[in-house]
Image (cartoon, rainbow, N blue to C red):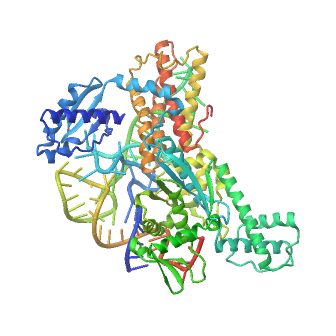
Amino acid sequence: MKHFVRKLINSALDRAKNNGDLELSVMPEIVVEKPKEEKFGDFSTSLAMGLAKSERRKPYEVAEILSSHLQSSEENIASVKIAGPGFLNLTMKPIFFLERLVKVAEQGDQYGSSNAGQGKKVLLEFVSANPTGPLHVGHGRGAAVGDMLGRLLDKAGYDVSTEYYINDVGNQMNTLGRSTWARYLELQGKVNEFSADYYQGDYIKDIARDIINKHGNEFLNKTEDQVLPFFREYALGSVLDGIKKDLSDFDVSFDRWFSEKNLYDQKLVDTSVSWLRQEKHVYDKDGAVWLKSSKFNDEKDRVLIKQSGEKTYFCSDIAYHKNKIDRGFEWIVDLWGADHHGYVPRMKSALKAMGYDESVFKVMLIQFVSLKRGGEKVSMSTRSGEFETLADVIKDVGLDATRFFFLMRSSDTHLDFDLELAKKESADNPVFYIQYAHARICSIFRKATENGIKLLDSADIDLSPLKNEEEFIMIKKILTFGETIEKSAELLEVHRIAFYLQDLVGTFHRYYSRNRIVSDDHALSSARLFLMNCLRITIRNGLSVMGVSAPDRM
RNA sequence: GCCCUCGUAGCUCAUCUGGAUAGAGCACCAGAUUCCUAAUCUGGGGGUAACAGGUUCGAGUCCUGUCGAGGGCACCA
């Protein structure tokens, strides 16, 4: 809708220029907004104020010139008014909105989709939790946000792939293996000390028990060195299966699970290090290999290969991100926990060292979830074993409510997730407000069928009986769905959809309480039913982008 | 100590990247159902946007400083 208005203004500018009314040495960017207040019309632009300086005229005069050129040749415009210091307020004729509403029904499931992203190849990497334990609530936020971003970018016309990076290399894998080995011995009645550094959670016992069931005591009299590879691999596989199940229960799927170990096996890490060496971006010092990251805006140089000969996590991460770009992705979006923010300049410096443009890489920092239980903070450390798993929360609060809870806030602010509150308030959760609207509309359709009123095709419908002001408020809101999707995708801000839906559905609930859709007036009923269908499509498409269900009955 | 993110109603958060009188939900108070789902609707109180400066036609939004919260400053991942 805004695109159309922007075009109108653009052509008015052209006419003003051709007429010599305005100089327009530089064509300004046209910003079209929806005024906060209904009385200011349907669209507004502060263009005249922006132009005033370069035109060396008063904002009001510029607004007057624009106004005259806008009004002269557009049949969709009902009025153009100048307000305040020079706002141009446009009011459109009803037909403008009704014509567009008809298209909503035609597009159905596709309504809100666009090619704004122009098929740009995007790689979304998210969750990527270390495979050392089940996913907790904090991971859930990343999962929900990442999954929704995938759906959102797809709908907005980007070519999206999603990926989970498995950190299956490093000391943590040995710790995982040793923890399992220790539990194994313990369960076999062999006394041993369970180190405080080991993973404390009960899931380790479950894995150990599983090993006993399958392999009995065959490892009992062996040394740690002999058994560690087996325990490490077994525990990794088991934890990873658990993570995959948790995510699939959360309705989150990945196009690819990318193993860090695989990077090493394919020599990709070695390749990128030698390439960097060739380009003279690395040097040797104190027996270690360093990247000259300080030359690329990082605060200091970083170690790639330790004295011990082991490669750092950073080192393989460089290879991983290089690989992402090599696979042809034009936009690399990583969702990281907020605690990794110090790592951002480091990664950016590495990409710059490799000669890539900084703009291809974007990190979204997902702020922490403070888990609370009745106002008291709950500690969430995998190692200590004190954490609420994502699976538990979904079980308690429900899939839809859990997803919605994570998605209704801007992801760069802290999120307080009070378990007691979430459980207790589940009936008041805004997700039900939205789902209820959908169920109500479905109920209207059941009633309409009873009364023999059919939903008409776009081609046959006569929307002229829609005259109510509340109807137009709703229609206008429905029609901003597409631009909400586009904006949300472009800014990678998922919460906008949740707010949009709450707002949209609010207009419906108010309308519903004051108006009957199915009545004796056949023409009016048909028109209203058609509107309800468009509304239902919008709600359904909005919820679907969030990965939340749209029930027919509640 | 240095760096990053944040600070908006009692609580949880919006405010369309600088626009018009800062808005929702929860909680609290008072009301609404002979009729398509009351998980709904109507009305009410509640604000120095942490604080102090600056930039301009115009600032919650941009800049500087102060205070407060969280996080980061490894040859860990």
Q: Quadrant of residue A95?
A: top left
Task: Say above or below: A304 vs A165.
Answer: below
Quadrant in which the C terminus of chain A appears: top right
Quadrant in which the N terminus of chain A appears: top left
Q: Position of residue A431 (x, y in %)?
A: 55, 42
Task: Say above or below: A120 vs A165.
Answer: above
Task: Say above or below: A8 vs A117.
Answer: above
Q: Position of residue A137 (x, y in %)?
A: 60, 58
For image coordinates 88% across by 72% down, the residue present is: A218
Query: Does the rendering let one see residue A483?
Result: yes
* Residue nearer the viewer, A76 or A466: A76
Task: Answer left or right for A257 relative to A527.
Answer: right
Task: Answer left or right for A208 relative to A317.
Answer: right
* Residue nearer the viewer, A150 or B58: A150
Q: Quadrant of residue A8?
A: top left
Task: Answer left or right for B76 relative to A54.
Answer: right
* Residue nearer the viewer, A41 or A481: A481
For image coordinates 48% across by 51% down, the residue present is: A409
Q: Position of residue B42 (x, y in %)?
A: 42, 33
Q: Quadrant of residue A262?
A: bottom right
Q: Position of residue A232 (x, y in %)?
A: 73, 70
Query: Does the rendering let one see residue A182?
Result: no
Residue extending farthest bottom: A286
Task: Say above or below: A44 vs A492.
Answer: above
Residue extending farthest front: A278
What is the number of callouts on the image? 0
